[in-house]
Image (cartoon, rainbow, N blue to C red):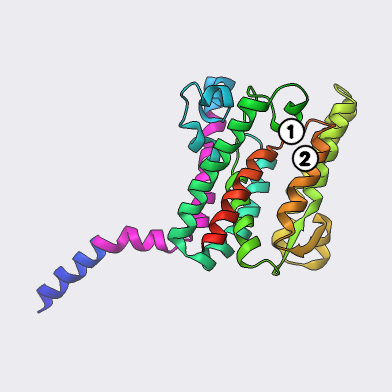
Amino acid sequence: MNKKLRKYTKKRLNSNFFKNIFRSFSITSWIIFANLLVFIILQFLIIFLGDKIISHVALQANYLFSGRVWTLLTSMFSHFEVWHLLANMVSLFFIGNFVERLIGRKRFFWLYLFSGIFAGLFYTSLSYFFGFGFLERIFLSPNVFAVGASGAIFSLLGLLAILTPHNKVYLIAGPLISIICLSVFSFLFPGSQFIQIFNFIVYFYLIFSVFAIFSFRPAILKIAFPVEMPFWFLPLIAIVPLVVVGLFVPLPIGNTAHLGGLIAGLIYGVYL
């Protein structure tokens, strides 16, 4: 009896050990971990290989339609700036965990993956065919590289806009406004020493905003300038103003990728 028990225990441990470890964390947590790991790896690759590594992982319309289809996937997990990584991962932490509990692990995983790929295709297609002349300000040049998880994250917002349209959510507006201000000042005063100082202030503010968010203290959270709104309104306020500003000032933001992810999320929300 004791021998049979040991065999049974050993069999259960061997078959479920890694599965139990995997399921002890949410899919959202694993995706965040993957993004952090890729970020660290990319920093080392840039040190040893230089900026040429960007063209092998980032999404660019000309390269994609020349055969680099893998960048649809690699770009989803790639970030080169700390502020970009922090902004996306903090958003994913709160929104992703909520959506995952709402629709389940498997649905969440496939939604995140396929909507991110769709957002990349949407962005590159518009850039490739329309990213010239004045329209370049809207669709971006086909020579511009794009990375980040925001396309997939916007699909989660689209899903919630359908499934829980009147639930309240906070848009952390402070970091977004600071990035827009930095882009505007950089455009108006290129090469100015003031820009370098302001750039440092913005980076410091972004990092401090992350700590303010996770402090869960209303008095400290005000520093990040949270604005409460229903889920159905959040995607609009997160896309439309940036498109308008982008008509006059170049922004380091892929609005069409955000729109593509949003469309994917809306479609899946209607399906559910």
Q: Which residues are magenta?
A: 15-44
Badge number at residue 138: 1
Residue 221, quarter of the rendered image = bottom right
* Proximity of marks 1 and 2: CB atoms separated by less than 8 Å: yes
Amino acid type at image mark 2:
Val
Residue 250, quarter of the rendered image = top right
Question: Where 131 falls versus 236 (above or below)?
Answer: above
Q: Is residue 221 left or right of residue 20?
A: right
Q: Is residue 27 magenta?
A: yes
Q: Categorize mark 1 by other alpha carbons within 10 Å: few (<14), some (14-19), many (20+).
A: many
Predominant secondary structure, magenta span: helix
Q: What's the residue at 69%, 69% (across, down)? A: 167
Q: Nearer the viewer, residue 92 or 25?
A: 92
Q: x%, y% of residue 219?
A: 83, 66
Badge number at residue 113: none
Image quadrant holding the N terminus, namely bottom left
Amino acid type at image mark 1:
Ile
Badge number at residue 243: 2
Q: x%, y% of residue 38?
A: 51, 39
Q: What's the residue at 23%, 67% (across, down)? A: 12
Marks 1/2: CA–CA distance:
7 Å
Q: What's the residue at 81%, 45% (across, down)? A: 241
